[in-house]
């Protein structure tokens, strides 16, 4: 199986061109290739596949083999791959995901139009009703609602960007024990499908700082859907405006929750690291 490793702000995935390759058992392959000691190393596996309704289709598997609806950093890299590897030479791209068909604008390098420097993604409308997260409890929005975790009371805001996010405002995310609390939120009974959790400090009305525990992968350097959810949560709580910069451990993302169309837009970089051939089990070349 030929693969390409790419990352968006350090959120790294193994990409396989499903127009040329076939993956027999994606969950097993995702677990194998993601292993940073015995595999290639990454936060998961992303398959680039043909689509009947868009330019291509994205399937994304976490490091534990579970399939996610979408990945903001992952889809930017997918767009770069699709353009630079000739699958679709378009700077306005439509990508089918489990969260719907998303529109992406590819930003070319000023000195070399064959290179994509960054990608702007229309992430879709945030889903704010409790049943859409999904989260147990009375119907309505979840904005600074109390949630007891391991005997400690937190106040949380919940947003779905096609996948579930729980946002917790803390004094200093860099000294917060994410490795302890992350899995306790992920597997909390309030979230029947698990949850991604963002631990956030608002710097000013234009900036937030965050760390993220991703469902199925653990702590990652960045999460695009998570940053989008945080941007929405910050505005819902009156802490920021609708245009903000997210400071993630892997770098910066520009985010806007547009008041006219209710869409969240995310702009950030995408980087190709290396390509190679995987000789593990569960895959074969078509």
Image (cartoon, rainbow, N blue to C red):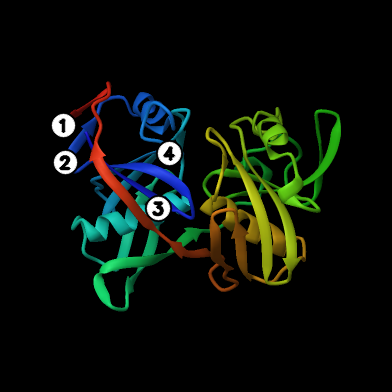
- Which of marks 4 and 3 precedes in the sequence? 4
Q: Compare residues 213 and 87 and report the one nearer the observer.
A: 213
- Which numbered circle lies on residue 42? 4
- Which of marks 4 and 1 precedes in the sequence? 4
Distance, label 2 to label 3, CA atoms, is 19 Å
Q: In which quarter of the image is the C terminus?
A: top left
Q: Compare residues 69 and 206 and report the one nearer the observer.
A: 206
Distance, label 3 to label 4, CA atoms, is 15 Å
Q: In which quarter of the image is the N terminus?
A: top left
Q: Position of residue 29 (x, y in %)?
A: 34, 27
The vertical placement of 63 against 155, above or below, is: above
- Which numbered circle lies on residue 211? none
- Which residue is tagged 2? 20
- Which numbered circle lies on residue 75? 3
User: How busy is the neighbourhood of tag 3: few (under 14 within 10 Å), some, or many (20 plus)?
Assistant: many
Are the residues at dot 2 and dot 1 in contact (C-beta closer than 8 Å)?
yes
Quarter of the view holding residue 5 = top left
- Residue name at image x 70 percent, y 27 percent: 189
Most distant residue in the left direction: 286
Relative side of 122 to 19, left or right: right
Q: Which of marks 1 and 4 is in front?
A: 4
- Residue name at image x 68 percent, y 62 percent: 208
- Residue name at image x 24 percent, y 48 percent: 52
Task: Let me know if residue 141 appears in the view.
Answer: no
Secondary structure, mark 2, is loop
Secondary structure, mark 4, is loop
């Amino acid at each position: 199986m030929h693969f390409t490793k790419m990352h968006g702000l350090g959120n790294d995935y193994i990409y396989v061109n499903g127009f040329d390759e076939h993956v027999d058992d994606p969950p097993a392959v995702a677990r194998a290739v993601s292993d940073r000691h015995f595999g290639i190393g990454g936060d998961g596996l992303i398959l680039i596949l043909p689509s009947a309704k868009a330019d291509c289709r994205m399937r994304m598997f976490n490091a534990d083999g579970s399939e996610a609806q979408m990945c903001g950093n992952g889809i930017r890299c997918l767009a770069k791959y699709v353009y630079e590897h000739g699958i679709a030479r378009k700077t306005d791209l439509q990508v089918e995901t489990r969260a719907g068909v998303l529109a992406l604008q590819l930003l070319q390098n000023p000195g070399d139009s064959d290179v994509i420097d960054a990608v702007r993604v229309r992430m879709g409308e945030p889903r704010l009703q409790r049943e859409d997260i999904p989260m147990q409890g009375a119907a309505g929005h979840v904005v600074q609602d109390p949630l007891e975790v391991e005997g400690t009371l937190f106040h949380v805001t919940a947003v779905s960007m096609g996948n579930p996010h729980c946002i917790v405002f803390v004094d200093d995310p860099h000294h917060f024990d994410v490795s302890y609390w992350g899995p306790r939120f992920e597997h909390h009974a309030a979230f029947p499908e698990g949850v991604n959790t963002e631990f956030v400090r608002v710097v000013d009305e234009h900036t937030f700082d965050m760390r993220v525990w991703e469902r199925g992968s653990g702590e990652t350097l960045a999460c695009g859907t998570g940053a989008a959810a945080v941007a929405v949560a910050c505005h819902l709580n009156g802490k920021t405006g609708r245009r903000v910069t997210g400071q993630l451990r892997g770098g910066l993302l520009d985010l806007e929750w547009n008041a006219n169309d209710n869409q969240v837009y995310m702009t950030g970089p995408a980087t190709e690291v290396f390509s190679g051939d995987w000789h593990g089990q569960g895959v074969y070349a078509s």
